Amino acid sequence: MSKTQPRALVIGASYAGLVAAAALRANDWSVRVIERSRERLRTGGGVVVQPRMMEYLTGRGLGIRDIIGVPAQTRKIFRPDGTVLTMPETASAYTSWDILLRRLEETLHPEDLQRGLAMVDIPDWGASGEVVLSDGTTDQADVVIAADGIGSSARRQLLPGIAPSYAGYVAWRGMVAEDQLSSDTVALFADSLSSFAGARTVILLYEVPGEDGTVTPGKRRINWVWYENIQDGQELKEVLTDTSQVTHRATVPRQMLPEGTLQRIHRTATEDLAPAFAEVVCRTEQPFVQTIDDLTIPRLVFGRVVLIGDAASLIRPHIGSGTAKAVDDAIQLAHALSDGCDEDLNCLAAWEHTRLEDHAGLAEYSRAIARRLGLGYR
């Protein structure tokens, strides 16, 4: 470890990457974050506010403004026979990715985040902490944190041949402003985490702040995620083909779903979902789709390069653990690196062992829930 201020290079301004950068900054590290995209991620939807992240950063004197969220007071389970089960909901407030990522970026110095810059090579298997960047320069850090998401370039280089595997179903996602819905539908879903499970489909929805951050009833947005079994092959190819006839591997972003796909969504929603849920889906102007994939890997540490978040493992989203896993990856990594870690980073062996076990346990639990819901292959 550097005898002066230690330094981390974070690859990817994802949720995991920004939490890791903030956690290390809170432990007096110098941090540089690079991000391939020139704009903040906008393909995500709603997300649970993780209180542990807020408590950790605040407790170490790193200011972060309150993250605006909408709390869910109840959980409503709508059943095909028309009955509704209602119970208390104890989860944190729900917000949106655009609000959350903006708040996390505010924990960095403006010059510490560079967009439009990617990692293209990791020499010597990560032993030196040196990486080659897309502008032709190199950078070297005490630790390189690869948080570059599902299609991680770092993972492909360090673990060639290991890639996400399709689980047999997709997630349609979207948001719609409450003022675009009927008053009865808004009232039905108000202050609740609501779900409906049919014979071959499951949908979940909840309220998040409006685009301007307002939480005033009637001016918020409803975020939804709808899981549908889609066979691999021609059917999946059609779902993942955009308006330019380009077939994507894992997601088709907003504004790129062809009219035929939108008609398919509306038709299937009307046939398979309870009416209020179908209204929410059909009134959404810019839905998008993502495949549900599985991935666990045998290693997280390669010399001075560490994989975290979705670059390290993919957990199906049924237990709401994606953001929690990213926070735990980042905070436990910051603890390990900042608690008397030696020059050779031997401190990371215990971190890797613990995180691999946690990832495996979460993956199996989420697959078990999918099986119970009738989703996917296994």
Image: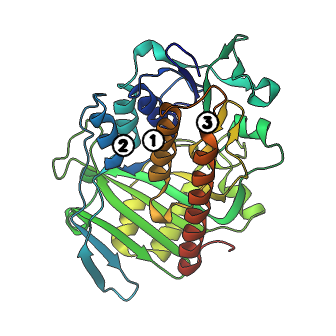
Mark with earlier residue (2, 1): 2
Disc on res. 41: none
Front residue of this view, candidates 260 and 24? 24
Find the distance from the CA under tag 2 to the CA under tag 1: 8 Å
Q: Secondary structure at mark 2?
A: helix
Classify mark 2: residues with Cα within 10 Å, few (<14), some (14-19) or many (20+): many
Residue type at mark 3 is: Asp
Task: Return the residue at label 2.
Answer: 53
Disc on res. 331: 1
Q: Quadrant of residue 229?
A: bottom right
Q: Position of residue 50 (x, y in %)?
A: 35, 49
Task: Return the residue at label 3.
Answer: 148
Q: Position of residue 140 (x, y in %)?
A: 66, 17
Image height of 259 relative to 118, above or below: below
Residue type at mark 1 is: Ile
Front residue of this view, candidates 101 and 331? 331
Res 147 visible: yes
Number of the front mark, 1 or 3: 1
Classify mark 1: residues with Cα within 10 Å, few (<14), some (14-19) or many (20+): many
Taking 119 as reference, is 205 left or right? Answer: left
Whether the residues at callouts 2 and 1 have beta carbons within 8 Å, the answer is yes
- Seen as rendered, the residue at the extreme right is 161
Residue type at mark 2 is: Met
Find the distance from the CA under tag 2 to the CA under tag 3: 20 Å
